[in-house]
Amino acid sequence: MKKNKICLIIPYFGKLPSYSNLFFESVKFNPDVDFLLLTDDTVNVNLQNLKVVNTTLEKVRDRAQTLFDFKIELTQAYKLCDFRPAYGLIFKEYLEGYKFWGHCDLDMVFGNIKHFITDDMLDQYDKIYQFGHLSLYKNVDKVNNEFRENFGMNYRKVFSTKINMVFDEIGGIQQKFNHDGFKTYKSWDFFDIDPWHYHIKRVTSHVPAALLVGGFDYESECLYWENGHVYRVAQTSDGLRKDEFIYAHFQKRSFSTPIDVIKTDSFYLSNNGCIAKNSDLVSSDKIVLYNQSSKVKELCVSYSKFKYIWKRRFNKYLLKK
């Protein structure tokens, strides 16, 4: 058995995004978790817990095709999201000795993973989390083949269409796990930043109503990373409150990550990117400064959301992709 019990798989094709340096810096602070990056780009990162496999989307498609007796559709890299529940089979050769495998995104910064995903959890659960930005699966045949089960989305239809079906998330593979009685850890101990607001706030879709009552999100809050941990400080009626999260997911944001900033011990994850943080405590003034509000920028984001939704609908329903 390998020292590290978890392997997170990240196929990424095309030029790696500029913010990936932030992701890799947070990987360095999680030596007890292994990461497998499959890419056709050059990776100038040398970490003991990061294995880079130089390959192409076409080779991954051919690898996946050998598992199925029907023609799969995998010509666009984004479609890989639908194949995530099958990664335990597609990338089986890399997973020998791991108790859990999983998948994650690059547009995120990890805190202390093993502080949240403990050995006791790995013993207790079959699946950990429910969303594409991070989900883990127990590395056993029954779990690795659950995507084939009849309940919910039909994997044959999902794998043979160009349309992205969001099979890797709560409305797809998780429905099968729920139906068949697998134990899933469903905590919201991550900070998923709402992409459709300039002001940083958490995504609330799919969040149980009971969690939304106090403590989930605040009007005045800011994020920072410090020595391998992700924190949120919020202004409450009782003063400042500090919470720790397993990661922050900054999807669909132009996120500035100056290398000289992220190589420091701590920095703010502001709505204008990473900004160096001194060792002093976060104050109310810092919260306002590093999670700004702007009516003009909120309008710009709303317009971007409108364009994104209608482009996606056009591609899905008219172009069938």
Image (spheres, rainbow, N blue to C red):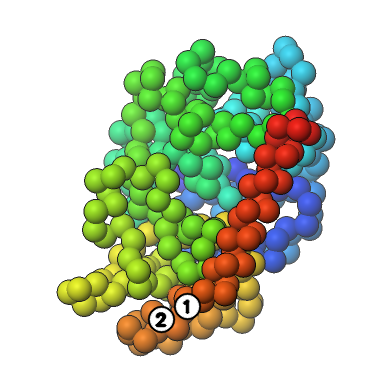
User: Does residue 158 lie above or below 225 as drawn?
Assistant: above
The answer to which of 134 and 99 lies nearer the viewer is 134
Spot occupied by residue 120 in the image (x, y as percentages of width and height) = 29, 41
Percent coordinates x, y for residue 104 in the rendering: 55, 47
Placement of 249 over or under 255, stated as above or below:
above
Q: Circle 1 is placed at which residue position?
A: 292
Label 1 packing within 10 angstroms: few (<14), some (14-19), many (20+): some
The amino acid on which the numbered mark 2 sits, given as a three-letter code, is Val
Viewer can see residue 228: no
Callout 2 touching callout 1 (CB < 8 Å): yes
Residue for point 34% across, 21% down:
181
Q: Position of residue 151 (x, y in %)?
A: 48, 16
Q: Amino acid at mark 1?
A: Gln
Disc number for residue 223: none
Give SS at disc 2: helix
Question: How busy is the neighbourhood of tag 2: few (under 14 within 10 Å), some, or many (20 plus)?
Answer: some
Q: Residue visible at 58% across and 50% down? A: 105
Residue 288, label in figure: 2
Among the 4 quarters of the image, the one containing residue 119: top left
Q: Quadrant of the C terminus?
A: top right
Residue 81 percent coordinates (x, y) = 63, 38
Secondary element under disc 1, as helix, strand or loop, is loop
